Amino acid sequence: MGFVFSPAAFNLLLQELKKDFKVYAPVLLKGKGRFSDTDTVGYGEINKIEDVVFDSKSYFSPKETFYPINQTLFYFTEDEYREPKIDPKGIVVFLRSCDIHAVQRLDKIMLENGPAPDYYYKQLRDKLKFILMDCPLSFDSCFCVSMGTNRTDNYSASIRPENGSYLCHVQEDINGLFASFGQPQEVTPLYVTENKITVNVPANLDLSAIIDHPIWQEYGRRCVSCGRCNTSCPTCSCFTMQDIFYQDNPKCGERRRVWASCQIDGFTDMAGGHSFRREQSQRMRFKVLHKVYDFKERFGIHMCVGCGRCDDVCPEYISFSRCVNKLAEAVQEVK
């Protein structure tokens, strides 16, 4: 079923929705850009539909709304611990098709990649509902069509602005609010069908043939190990742990989970001085092959969803899509 909303009608829906849910969407973050006095687009809670930025891709992905950058797992004293309270409200997120596919990738790692699901991830993930943002036009760095993530049916409702109104296709009428505030109208979500960038992911990759290929050295010389590609990626899930001891009572504190990056020097360091990937070229090789090879070997789908954010944020202008295409060329060379 579909509905059309005036801005005022959709804002009434939002006011009712926010009684039971925290509602996140891409918003303009004033003064939060890469350079001083510049703005950027990131995720934040919205109070009205006019807060949502529909015509730009967000710098960070929506994963921070349900997989926090910095999350307290428990508080401890000398002889006991307790978990932090969880907000009883659900979570509604406005996001694009590629980002919904990215949540599916995170689910594979956090819920299915071990004997038990990640307890803390599952607590927030179970609260999550998707509002699909129609995405009929491609942004410059996107290659979602090549990765097969440009379309999805996994959403509660879709939304797009059109001629001063908002059109929604509804599959799950949350609390009956869409029918209460919208006017019935036939609506079909719009999806991008072509990107400027086409990526050729190599199939039947022979690791032994490309493991020492010169392309890894080339990217190793360019990468500065800042980790931006990981923190902007909607599918990266690596984290580290920090025990924080309070200054006023060093016997009390909290354990936090904090996002980490496989591209940062020291990420794979171990006791005794061993490191699995000491050279940057090794770390770049690991990231690329993890995104387009071994994740699929384990779960049947590529980890990369083609959102292109890693290309957008890299200070050295390293293009992941170009890297994958060069890998495909390298595979042909060594055959």
Image (tube, grey):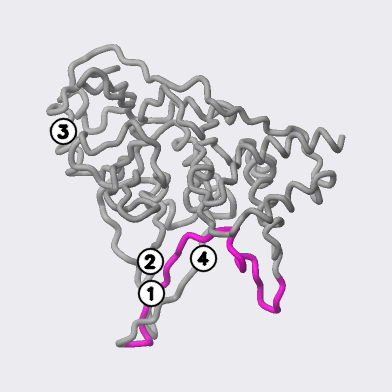
* Residue at the image position 54 percent from the left and 35 percent from the top: 306
For marks 1 and 4, give the one nearer the viewer: 4
Image coordinates of residue 305 in percent, x first then y, are 54, 36
Q: Earlier in the sequence, mark 1 or mark 4?
A: 4
| Rendered residue at 65%/70% (across/down) | 269
The residue to which callout 4 is attached is 240
Per the image, the residue denoted by label 3 is 11
Residue 57: % across, % down: 40, 37
Q: Comparing marks 1 and 3, which lies closer to the viewer? A: 3
Q: Amino acid at mark 3?
A: Asn
How much space separates mark 3 and mark 2, taking CA atoms? 33 Å
> Which segment is the magenta one?
249-274
| 279 to 175, vertically: above or below | below
Looking at marks 2 and 4 on the same chain, the residue that comes earlier in the sequence is marked by 2
Mark 1 and 4 residues: CB-CB less than 8 Å, in contact? no
Spatial CA span between label 3 and label 4: 39 Å
Cα separation between marks 1 and 2: 7 Å
Q: Is residue 117 visible?
A: no
Earlier sequence position, callout 1 versus callout 2: 2
The residue where tag 1 is placed is: 254
Quarter of the image with the C terminus in it = top right
What's the residue type where badge 4 is placed?
A: Thr
What is the CA distance from the residue labelled 2 to the residue labelled 4?
12 Å
State the SS at label 4.
strand
Q: Which residue is mark 2?
A: 72
**What amino acid type is highlighted by mark number 2?**
Thr
